[in-house]
Amino acid sequence: MSKKKDSLKPWLSRPAINRSVTLPLTRPLTQRLSNLNEFHPNELDPYLLFDARDSMIGTLENPTLDLDPSKPDTLNVITATRAGTTATYTDSSGLIQVASADTVRVDHVDGVPMILVEPSATNLLDYSEDFSNAAWTKNNLSVESGQTSPSGDTSAFRLNEDTSAGYHNLYTLGPTSDEYHTATIYAKAGERTKIVVSLGADSNRVIYDLLAGTFVNSGLGEGKMEAVSNGWYKCSTSTKYPTPTPVYHLVSLVEDSGARIYTGDGTSGVYIWGAQLEAGSVATSLIPTSGGDAAARTRAADDLVISGSAFSDFFNASEGTFYVEVVDRQATETAHSYIVGQSTSQFFIYKNDGDVFVSSYDGPLGVLNVGSVVANQLFRAAVSYKTGVSPAPSVKSLSFNGTSEVDQPYSGNFAATNILKIGSGYTNVFSGHFRRIIYWPYHSDSL
């Protein structure tokens, strides 16, 4: 993104706001920005109705940072580090693509572009796309290569049931462990429209309907299903094993009646692609593998940072307001930050360890908790701060989905911030998506 290095920050000399003529907006910030592509004149500051963007005065116009994944140029201020490993994302056509090293991944979720941030992960399977390999055991079925995949090439396979009576499945063994693991497979309906994906014991199975796009959990299995493109679905299930045992990734055909044990007709089947087995309870993006190279099975964490002049050009140390739209894959596990400065005393918005609250923290004066995160569900949060005001040297506010707002004095550590980290900067790296990140160099009294 090009910048005028010799220009003064426009907000440093901004005219004082005349509160007597600046009418308050009718809804909190986190509600007003719930659909940033819509235009509602009756909800805007009066000056917006007749004033140009560069000369508007009011409460929160003219953000100095607006990271909007639908406008890739706005992401140029981010320095991305993810070197030497394969990382994938879903493009605007719904196809799975391999990302270049050290780039921001814009992942399209149900057609909506979002910044994808993930921790390091390892695909524990040697052959993620070659189901003809002997590493995959075939039981009462055969595999047929050369099928069109979710990436647009012909690397997918078809599973064809034989005429035997019994289960019709394939599986491969993973490590021995009693920890959470997640198995993923991309699948598409053929003559058979349902599959089972399980991690070991039959009680851990999840049944996926590849026509309806729905799934049913059974026992310990925790399923998830995402539409990709051209009838393909990403089907994943997570399970924590009660005792150490070999973890195996199993895909089984299901007969029309719902039976998993049946006599095959010798011709029916489904399409599969992109198997993954990874530690943890979250299905991350596909890490393609093609053999025994362990290094090639690990994807590095996304490290997204705004620093240097890119940071100083938008940030105001004395007062400011951040707004984020986030989809978090992990609701109750591990603390992690959403946006943070360079130290653990400069958390603008993060999730507390041991609970499910969105929080803000700035050192010795404690934590603001405002709302519960629901896994895989979009939430909106805003934090605003200002120095030199009572009841302490500084004050900050935090809100969540427009329904909760808390205020608290703070120590002013935000004033030392000279870097912005997106999704990292704490013990654990965030896993999920950012739909929008906006910053205004002004304090807001109504979040």
Image (cartoon, rainbow, N blue to C red):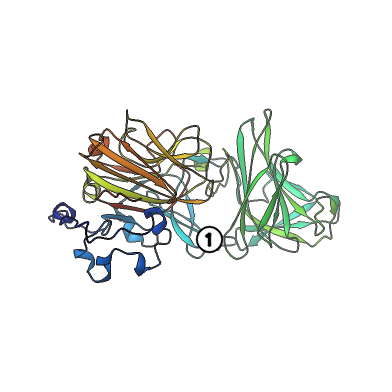
Q: How many marks?
A: 1
**Residue 285, x across and y down, in percent:** 52, 49
- The kind of residue on which mark 1 rests is Asp
Q: 19 or 265, which lies in front?
A: 19
Q: In the picture, which quadrant includes the N terminus?
A: bottom left
Residue reaching furthest to the bottom: 50
Q: Which residue is mark 1?
A: 110
Residue at the location (29% across, 35% down)?
410
Q: Establish if 385 lies above or below 209.
A: above
Q: Establish if 189 lies above or below 440.
A: below
Quadrant of the image occupied by residue 81: top left
**Residue 106, x across and y down, in percent:** 43, 56
Q: Establish if 74 lies above or below 429.
A: below
Crowd band around label 1 with a 10 angstrom C-alpha radius: few (<14), some (14–19), many (20+): few
**In-image side of 109 versus 242 (left or right):** left
Q: 215 or 388, which lies in front?
A: 388
Residue at the location (12% across, 55% down)?
6
